[in-house]
Image (cartoon, helix red, strand yellow):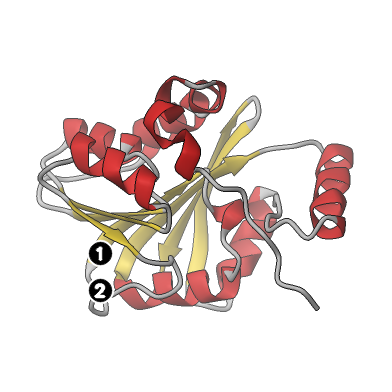
């Protein structure tokens, strides 16, 4: 079976924030920024950080120790400009260099549906998140018929990606020591908050 391909963002990196996709992401950014609970000094990691917009906005709310990881080097170049005092690394989200139990908060905004190894991502989050820490996932919220057609089309064309409901996402993490704290949505955007037990 051939390996699935993924959407590439390297050619869009410099103009991503001002592009149609960047503007479409604004609803997700707002949902995350308004709902992630932070305190000064917290260790915060964004998985699939892209251009660093979320990290930058969260750092405006609180004095955090922020880090970001992504596999798109051109996007990371933008994130490093936006978040010059943060550690921004090129690595996959299922195999990071961080020590066990390092983070208070992990965020994945408009990234989860792209991750090729979702079980690996769940396992890695369980490893590096502190007990009682929170994982926030913001991803598209689509009606069932559209979700089924989209997921089928992605499978047929061997494109990496799958859109889940909030309950399905929570179920994906239940075997890794997470429970759903809550979920929120706004039109086509949803946010799931999972707590590490």
Left or right for 90, reference 166: left
The Cα atoms of the two marked residues, 1 and 2, are separated by: 9 Å
Could you tell me if residue 161 is visible in this image?
yes
Residue 14 lies in quadrant: top left
Among all residues in the image, which is located at the extreme front? 11
- Percent position of residue 105, x then y: 30, 56
- Percent position of residue 43, x then y: 19, 57
Residue 67 lies in quadrant: bottom left
Secondary element at image label 2: loop
Secondary element at image label 1: strand
Mark sitting on residue 98: 2
Q: Nearer the viewer, mark 1 or mark 2?
A: 2
Q: Around disc 2, counting alpha carbons within 10 Å, would you say few (fewer than 14), some (14 to 19), or many (20 or more)? A: few
Q: Does the CB distance between marks 1 and 2 fall below 8 Å?
A: yes
Dot placed on the residue nearer the N-terminal end, 1 or 2: 2
Q: Around disc 1, counting alpha carbons within 10 Å, would you say few (fewer than 14), some (14 to 19), or many (20 or more)? A: many
Left or right for 59, reference 148: left
Residue shown at 52% from the left, 43% from the top: 110
- Percent position of residue 117, x then y: 58, 71
Residue shown at 32% from the left, 47% from the top: 76
Mark sitting on residue 103: 1
Point out the image quarter for the N terminus. bottom right
Q: How many marks?
A: 2
Residue shown at 79% from the left, 52% from the top: 154
């Amino acid at each position: 079976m051939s390996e699935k391909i993924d959407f590439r963002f390297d050619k869009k990196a410099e103009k991503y924030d001002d592009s149609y996709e960047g503007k479409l992401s604004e609803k997700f950014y707002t949902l995350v920024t308004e709902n992630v609970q932070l305190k000064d000094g917290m260790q915060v990691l964004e998985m699939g950080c892209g251009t660093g917009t979320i990290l930058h906005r969260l750092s405006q709310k609180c004095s955090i120790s922020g880090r970001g990881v992504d596999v798109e080097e051109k996007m990371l170049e933008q994130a490093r400009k936006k978040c010059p005092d943060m550690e921004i690394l090129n690595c996959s989200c299922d195999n990071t260099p961080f020590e066990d139990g390092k983070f208070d908060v992990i965020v994945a905004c408009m990234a989860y549906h792209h991750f090729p190894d979702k079980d690996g991502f769940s396992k890695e989050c369980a490893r590096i998140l502190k007990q009682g820490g929170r994982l926030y996932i913001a991803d598209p919220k689509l009606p069932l018929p559209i979700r089924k057609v989209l997921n089928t089309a992605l499978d047929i064309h061997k494109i990496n990606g799958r859109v889940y409901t909030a309950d399905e996402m929570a179920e994906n993490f239940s075997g890794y020591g997470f429970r759903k704290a809550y979920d929120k949505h706004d039109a086509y955007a949803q946010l799931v908050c999972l707590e590490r037990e």
